[in-house]
Image: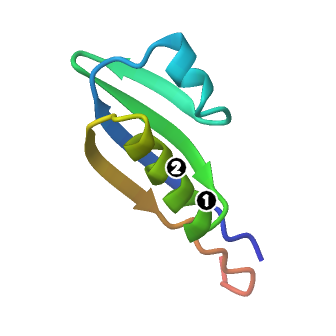
Amino acid sequence: MNTTRSIRITVRGRLSSHLAATFDGLTLVRRTGRTELVGEVADQAHLHGLLSRIRDLGLELESVTVTDPEPSHPDRER
């Protein structure tokens, strides 16, 4: 069973290339005054690890959005 979830973490400011490298595997979307880290996490431990890294780097967390994967319904009639 696939438990990955899509995430969007927004921090204030623009992340430098050096800081961006610490979030390998996530896509960075730079917006005016903030940076969004977009990708997938395997589980809660992975998400908490990313949030801890943000804290340890002294980044200001603005928001976190976690989206459950679309459920598959193989027995659904079409």
Residue 20 position within the rendered picture, expressed as x and y whole percent measured from the top left: 53, 23
Query: Measuring 43% from the left and 24% from the top, which residue is drawn there?
Result: 29
Residue 2 position within the rendered picture, expressed as x and y whole percent measured from the top left: 74, 70
- Outermost residue on the bottom side: it is 75
5 versus 78 height, above or below = above
Residue 56 position within the rendered picture, expressed as x and y whole percent measured from the top left: 43, 42
- Cα distance, mark 2 to mark 1? 6 Å
Instruction: Count all numbered tags in the image, as a single digit.
Output: 2
Image quadrant of residue 5?
bottom right
Q: How is the image coloured?
A: rainbow
Query: Measuring 23% from the left and 15% from the top, which residue is drawn there?
Result: 32
Question: Which residue has dot 2 on it?
Answer: 50
What's the mark number on residue 23? none
Mark 2: secondary structure: helix
Discs 2, 1 touching: Cβ within 8 Å? yes
Mark 1: secondary structure: helix
Q: Classify 10 Å Cα crowding around label 2: few (below 14), some (14-19), many (20 and above).
A: some
Looking at the image, residue 5 sits to the left or right of residue 2; the answer is left
Looking at the image, residue 77 sits to the left or right of residue 51; the answer is right
Q: Nearer the viewer, residue 16 or 78?
A: 16
Image quadrant of residue 42?
bottom right
Residue 45 position within the rendered picture, expressed as x and y whole percent measured from the top left: 59, 67
Query: Measuring 57% from the left and 65% from the top, which residue is drawn there?
Result: 69
Looking at the rendered image, the quarter that the C terminus falls into is bottom right
Query: Measuring 22% from the left and 19% from the top, which residue is drawn there?
Result: 33
The amino acid type, in three-letter code, at marker 1 is His
23 versus 56 height, above or below = above
What's the mark number on residue 46? 1
Looking at the rendered image, the quarter that the N terminus falls into is bottom right
Looking at the image, residue 37 sits to the left or right of residue 13; the answer is right
The amino acid type, in three-letter code, at marker 2 is Leu
